[in-house]
Amino acid sequence: MSGVTTYTEEKALLICERLADGESLKSICEDESMPSKSTVFKWLGENATFSDMYARARETQADALFDDILSIADDARNDWMEKNFGEETRWVENGEALRRSQLRIDARKWMAGKLRPKKYGEKLDINLDGSVNFAISSEPVSEEQWLKDNGSED
């Protein structure tokens, strides 16, 4: 565990810079020259300036994660591997590497969506007009036909 407990602007800036570059707070605080996570959380509660810097760094971190997603998706270095089948050698898909890349992408998408929901979160299109309509039919019916059959004047 780190012995750093005294707040300094230099440490605060370094923490925020590393966060903005996409590094996790856990990995930052594992560095011997940095404070523990509990100390960082204490500083966040005690220092409004640091709290604001930290919030901006977390927003910027979402942009770094988005950039990581593109890099991971574009990196095809381990997508294929040579495999021996008796005397024959063939190139085959490296399923483990592909699944790992997908996991890395999904984790970053989730985190970016949580850090900056307006920019990277799931977009929901919810329209509420106060009415609910159900129709059961054995064949598809167009919206216009349904409205005509059910007496709507829209």
Image (cartoon, grey):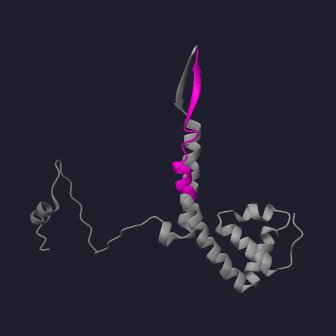
**80 in magenta:** yes
Q: Is residue 98 above or below residue 148?
A: above
Q: Quadrant of residue 25?
A: bottom right
Residue shown at 75%/72% (left/top)? 14
Count the labels in the image: 0
On the image, the x and y values in percent for residue 1 come to 87, 63
On the image, the x and y values in percent for residue 85 come to 57, 18
> For this rendering, which residue is in front, 90 or 115?
90
Q: Which residues are magenta?
A: 68-86
110 left or right of 7 in image:
left
Q: Quadrant of residue 146?
A: bottom left
121 left or right of 55 in image:
left
> For this rendering, which residue is in front, 130 or 25?
25
On the image, the x and y values in percent for residue 101 come to 57, 46
Spot the residue most to the top: 87
Residue shown at 80%/61% (left/top)? 30
Q: Is residue 55 above or below residue 105?
A: below
Quadrant for the C terminus, please: bottom left
**71 in magenta:** yes
Q: Quadrant of residue 11?
A: bottom right
Residue shown at 42%/66% (left/top)? 123
Residue shown at 81%/73% (left/top)? 39
13 left or right of 94 in image:
right
On the image, the x and y values in percent for residue 57 come to 64, 73
Spot the residue most to the bottom: 48
